[in-house]
Amino acid sequence: MKSKQLEDGGYGGCFGGICSSGSDETSLAIMALISAGEENYSSTIINASSCLKTFQNLDGGFNSSHDWGSSNVDSDSWAILAYRDWE
């Protein structure tokens, strides 16, 4: 999983040769990596957490990888859980 981390530190998908990170995928990757024993302060987790912060909206929520700008309860909860595991 660590080898799939994108240049911006996040995780996501590739379509038509263009890869982009998403808040949902990055949150889930953080939780999975920590559950698998990755140290909380490894460069992999730090970079993923930094990327995840870029998805936070002005209302405090997180936009989905598919909503492009709209906060939603699913993305919010995954980000909160990822940060809880990371702290």
Image (cartoon, rainbow, N blue to C red):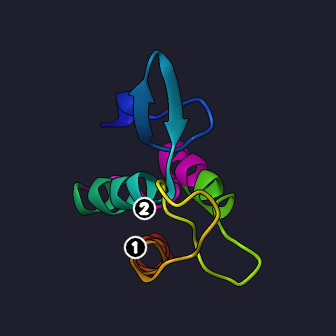
25 vs 44: above or below:
below
Viewer-nearest residue: 73 or 2: 73
Residue 77 rendering spot, x and y as whole percentages = 41, 81
Judge whether 56 appears above or below 1 on screen. Answer: below
Residue plotted at (46% across, 70% down):
86
Quick one: 6 or 24, which is closer to the camera?
Answer: 24
Range of the magenta residues?
37-48
What residue do we see at 45% from left, 35% from top?
Answer: 5
Amino acid carrying mark 1 in the image: Trp
The dot on residue 27 is: 2
Q: Position of residue 28 (x, y in %)?
A: 34, 59
Magenta-span inclusion, residue 60: no
Disc 1/disc 2 C-alpha distance (Å): 6 Å
Residue 31, how many percent across, how many down? Answer: 33, 63
Q: Tell me, yes or no, whether the two marked residues, 1 and 2, touch with CB atoms within 8 Å.
A: yes
Which residue has dot 1 on it? 78
Vertical side of 25 occupied by 57: above or below: below
